[in-house]
Amino acid sequence: ETGVTQTPRHLVMGMTNKKSLKCEQHLGHNAMYWYKQSAKKPLELMFVYSLEERVENNSVPSRFSPECPNSSHLFLHLHTLQPEDSALYLCASSRFRGFHSPLHFGNGTRLTVT
Amino acid sequence: DQQVKQNSPSLSVQEGRISILNCDYTNSMFDYFLWYKKYPAEGPTFLISISSIKDKNEDGRFTVFLNKSAKHLSLHIVPSQPGDSAVYFCAALSGGATNKLIFGTGTLLAVQP
């Protein structure tokens, strides 16, 4: 049990589909993150939420839309994706944003865009 | 341009021996460094960290060394165990107000029984 749960674990979608990734943390943390891991590339930070407010958007295309309804839940809404968006999407949380709080990651959603 | 580099994509070590994983960085503003371990089909898990005011931090079998002048850090695992086989990511952080970690590409460690 990692404390951070992501669903679904695998997702295959066409370029015209709309889908959502879900993340839930049971750690009482105040900050949540979306990361993208593509093959042979470093983990890339996409979005940061602190106390349910989006505090960072790392030039992510608008076809990715995050939502944080409360401090325990984080969503990533996907629409009209491209094949190059196929990757592992990781959610993470930390006690606070900054101040060297280690990130706790979920197991990720393996996304394939066809 | 990658600010955190792990130049060895893989490393193979015999059980009981030392594993040394290396990481180089380019940004002198980084002041905190972390190592994460990742098993297949799981997310990364935090392993050990070090502040730039230190040059060594030890936790059981794991020790991280920091050489600020060389902008280099390393993770030592002694003795290595087959369960240590995983991908190890180095990450760096600058400033205290944000938690924007910059990750390396990872090194796959295989510990042979």
Image: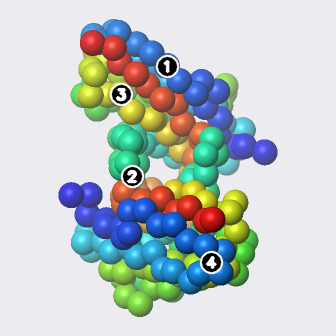
What's under tag 4, amino acid-wise?
A: Phe
Q: Pinpoint residue A83: horizontal percent, then vertical percent.
A: 68, 63
Residues marked 4 and 1, same chain: no
Q: Quadrant of the N terminus of chain B?
A: top right
Q: Which residue is mark 1?
A: B11
Which is more toward the observer, A53 or B27? A53
Q: Which residue is mark 3?
A: B85
Q: Is residue A11 above or below residue A63?
A: above
Residue furthest out toward the left: A1
Query: Which residue lies at the image location 38% right of the left edge and 69% below the top edge?
Result: A8
State the SS at label 2: loop
The mark that comes first in sequence, 3 or 2, is 2
Q: CA distance from mark 3 to mark 2?
A: 15 Å
The mark that comes first in sequence, 1 or 3, is 1
Q: Report which quarter residue B60 is drawn in.
A: top left
Q: Pinpoint residue A85: horizontal percent, then vertical percent.
A: 65, 63
Whether residue B106 is visible, yes or no, is: yes
Residues marked 4 and 3, same chain: no
Q: Quadrant of the C terminus of chain B?
A: top left
Q: Pinpoint residue B52: horizontal percent, then vertical percent.
A: 53, 40
Tag of residue A70? none
Q: Which residue is mark 2?
A: B43
Q: CA distance from mark 4 to mark 2?
A: 21 Å
Left or right: where does residue A93 sit relative to residue A2? right
Q: Which residue is mark 4?
A: A64
Q: Pinpoint residue A64: horizontal percent, then vertical percent.
A: 62, 77
Residue furthest out toward the right: B1
Left or right: where does residue A72 sit relative to residue A97? left
Q: CA distance from mark 2 to mark 1?
A: 20 Å
Which chain's residue wears label 2?
A: B
